[in-house]
Image (cartoon, rainbow, N blue to C red):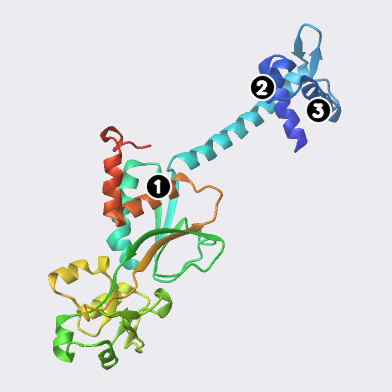
Amino acid sequence: MDRYRRMAILATVVEQGSIRRAARELRLTPSAVSQQIRRLEEETGVTLLRRSTRRLSMTEAGEAFYEGCAAMVAAARSAYDSLTALQESPVGELSISAPAGFAATHLLKAIAPLLAVHPALSLRLVVTDDGVEIISDRIDLAITIGTPITSSTLVRRHLADWPLVLCASPRYLAQRGVPASPQELAQHAFLALPRWHHGTDVMTGPKGQQYRVDVAPRVLSNNQVAIRDLTLMGLGLSFHVVPEIAEDLAAGRLVRVLPDWTLPPVAVAALMPSRTRQPSKIRMAVDALRAYLNPKVQAETEKRTPRSKRHSTR
């Protein structure tokens, strides 16, 4: 490693035209620069520079060796500039994993504007309702809904808190009756995700009373979209985050059950590998998701941003 450092020092001496100017550029003393050049000559067994009190010149061997040293320094600078560009500009592949419902309903709408503005950015989307191996699968961002973080090697960025509600289709309620209390839920069919998908099913009543819903589901699936579709078909009750069924609620295709009882909100988060500094493509993707999922935050950001900068690609 010291040899390559001495080669870089030689290239700087030649480019600056003197040891003193090279020392100033490298923030070393002239004697330290001279010592490194002498060690390089000792290692190669070749005189590289002719020194005199008035000028510094290269030998024929020094000129040939300098070409390789200069190419090495240029390659190092190019590599550093490329790394800096990756940090400062959203370029390259952005890999995101997300549950099926979230990917179709929210993720694409949030990320599409980022892709439109930055043509050097590409997207690899992994749609799955199961967990992913973020490191081995080379995932930049893993979107989770209610799933707690289980690894100390990952960084968690909170995106939003979504209300969780219990609902059913009008057809199901007409056939099986409308539950009047949480205790009556044991008499109904449930369609559910595995319990690890969400933290708790503890409902809180209008007077602060609590009830834990602990019913064996008739249908168990890792896919929330399948749970929603089966609920729409009238096969049972199910828990859903409001943004993913808002249209069904508004159209009356689904109805809230026990609307006076509330459930803890579900956290939407982005998990990513731990790094000293996240590349700009990841930082901008997190910002885009947070703004999309929190319209009030986006509106306040736009108020604070001068109109001339709102369409900036930087």
Along the line of sight, the residue nearer the viewer: 121 or 180 = 180
Question: In the rendered image, which residue does mark 3 sit on?
Answer: 40
Q: Is residue 156 above or below residue 85?
A: below
Which of the two marks, 2 or 3, is nearer to us in this view?
2
**83 lies left or right of 225:** right
Residue situated in front as seen by the camera: 237 or 183: 183
Query: What residue lies at 66% left-to-right and 31% top-to-bottom?
Result: 72
- Residue 228, placed above or below residue 213: above
- x and y, in percent, of residue 152 in the image: 56, 63
Say which quarter of the image contains residue 212: bottom left
Distance from label 1 to label 2 (Cα)?
A: 36 Å
Q: Which of marks 2 and 3 is nearer the N terminus?
A: 2
Q: Distance between the residues labelled 3 and 1?
A: 46 Å
Q: How far apart are marks 2 and 3 (CA)?
A: 19 Å
Give percent across and percent down for residue 20.
Answer: 73, 16
Q: Which element is circle 1 on?
A: helix
Pick whichever of labels 1 and 2 is earlier in the sequence. 2
Q: In this view, does 78 lie above or below 46?
A: below
Q: Name the residue under label 2.
A: 25
Image point 47% across, 55% down: which residue? 140
Identify residue type, mark 1. Answer: Met
**Front position among marks 3 and 1:** 1
In the image, residue 113 sits, relative to residue 267, either above or below, namely above
Left or right? Give the position of 282 relative to 177: right
The kind of residue on which mark 2 rests is Glu
The tally of labels here is 3
Residue pointed to by mark 1: 284
Of 1 and 268, nearer the camera is: 268
Q: How crowded is mark 3: few (under 14 residues within 10 Å), some or many (20 or more)?
A: many
Q: Do the residues labelled 2 and 3 touch (CB within 8 Å)?
A: no
- Does residue 275 appear left or right of residue 218 in this picture? right
The local secondary structure at tag 2 comes to helix
